[in-house]
Image (spheres, rainbow, N blue to C red):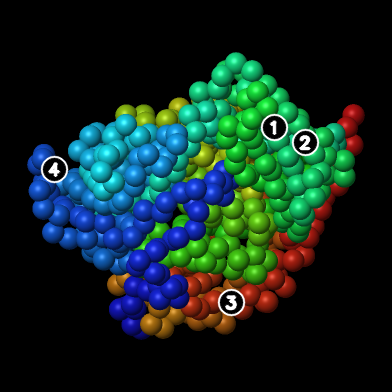
Amino acid sequence: MSRSAPRRSRFADDVDPDAPHPEYPRPQLRRPDWTNLNGWWDLALVDVGAPQPVDFPSRILVPFPIGAVLSQVGHTLRPDECAWMRRRFTLDPSTIGGRLRLHFGAVDWECTVYLNGVEVGSHRGGYDPFHLDVTDALATGGEQEIVLRVWDPTDDGHQPVGKQSLTPVAIWYPAVAGIWQTVWLEPVPTTCIERVVTTASLDAETITVTVGVSAAERGDSVRLTAMAERSVVGTAEAEVAGDLAEAVLAIPGLRVWSPEDPFLHDLGVEIVRDGVVVDSARSYFGAREVALARDAEGALRLVLNGECRFHLGLLDQGWWPDGLYSAPTDAALAFDIEAAKAMGFNVIRKHVKVEPARWYWHADRLGMLVWQDMPSTRVDIPALAEATIAGKEQGDVDWNLVSPAGDPTGFRRELDAIIDALEPFPSIVVWVPFNEGWGQHDTAATLAHVSERDPGRLVDGPSGWVDAGSGDVRDHHMYDREEQLPGPEPSRAVVYGEFGGYKCAVENRVVAGFTFGYGEAKDADALARDYATLLGVIAGLADRGLAGAIYTQTTDVEGEINGMLTYDREVAKIPFHRLREIHEPLTARRWPIAPTK
């Protein structure tokens, strides 16, 4: 078996180094005037305490992170060093006509930004988008220079880090650092639309639209136009109060969003002042409702649009052999969702990682339900290994040692920022704040906070291991014991947040020397047989009250070779049509809701 497969996916050849990821990066709030700053940036790696370097001897291809093959920088950024990145561009300030914002989709982890030698802002958080107003730092001459200082301690720190590790092995993957999503410039008026969130009431056939507005003046209003297949289906207008405006769109015959019919309405948003439009943007929404309900047998089920359905999904890490955190292209971003759909799954659990906004738009338009994890804080791998080797039960492990708890570097701030960024996407139906005790802390309070922050979605509490009795979902991780369905919960739906995970190597498709999985199939035929048997078990459990199950996982990742696809996305270990045949009887099931007393 070869252990030296090339670190390339099928999409690597499609990367244009002069214009990587050229697509507009924010589908939920689109503006026509913008400038993409992806491409070649200058790079210098220096000691963490060193001043800004004079020379930048290397270069990096943005938006691929330090450490990724596609970035052309095969270096692991250590906690005792930092990266300085530089990009020059030409812009005449007199052409802006308002304010100029510099947007970053994501930078891992801490960064300080300078424009023309002026510090314009800083940010901590590897997963949430942010922008800086750089108008006042623009040079009059036309040529402008952005410099970015990046520091990232990875799992030497206490910040959310997901699966990254400075010592990757088994389920832990290589460290990434720096810019890993699109960077762009966007002129905006002083009074502008900041955010658009929608909530559907299907019985009333209405959509409540909440618009965030900055620098509004007395008397400003927000005007909304909803369209379906290029026809206007609803309009509304509401006055801005403070920094918000809320209006209700009545849409008779409202078409509902679902995995079977992922219909998206277009939404035009305008700020109007004295009859004049001072800002406008394009958005969209999917009309859907999420809830829990008891079926006729008394089991709590996951409900979408008034229907109890089984959530059958894939654990999706979102890693790439060539881009690590960054998919090579937009088509690559869509591919894993398209593949999951073609396999007959109706859910993706996005595991301890956040994707670019376009990934969620692809999920919206393709009709894929999403369970969204919060990236976890670090795990002390030696301490966890010691506890495992000692045979300790989960209740006997000191989790404050294995996974340092608390919030020293802004877990809650970044959690809120991620919810703010992703709340507009209808495909997301479940938030997963904690996974397997990794950095788990203040569990009940955190889950309650998420429920209050976004009451229109369910909250998983937590996924696996150290349950605290809260949340909407009781989530078990059931490797090698799937048939042992735990008892029902009085107020929570019971799911398997992870199961299966069968290890199966494919010749010349494995990149790591040490490989990992849960159970093993010697070849693809054995994997297909074992998987069909396992799904028969899951189907039987669904009749006994199991509400959902997430199979580990979409693709092989580094040393984990338990994917439905190889890491390079070239080989499907089980034919898609066979998987659809196995899944369709379960995903098509609908349990009747018990009548209300």
Query: Marks 1/3: CA distance?
Result: 50 Å
Residue 96 horizontal/vertical position (percent): 42, 40
Q: Nearer the viewer, residue 35 or 3?
A: 35
> N-terminal of the two: label 3 or label 4?
4
Within 10 Å of disc 1 (Cα), the crowding (few <14, some 14-19, many 20+) is many
The residue tagged 3 is: 574
Instruction: Tell me what residue is drawn at x 49 percent, y 48 percent.
Output: 33
The residue tagged 2 is: 235
Query: Marks 2/3: CA distance?
Result: 48 Å
The answer, for residue 484, to whether it is visible in the render is no
Residue 200 horizontal/vertical position (percent): 74, 37
Q: Nearer the viewer, residue 144 or 355?
A: 144
Instruction: Determine the secondary structure under disc 1.
Output: strand
Residue farthest toward the top in the current orientation of the protein: 218
Three-letter amino acid code of the residue under disc 2: Thr
Image quadrant where one finds the N terminus: bottom left
Callout 1 touching callout 2 (CB < 8 Å): yes
The answer, for residue 595, to whether it is visible in the render is yes
Query: Marks 1/2: CA distance?
Result: 8 Å
Instruction: Tell me what residue is drawn at x 51 percent, y 23 percent.
Output: 215
Discs 2/4, front: 2
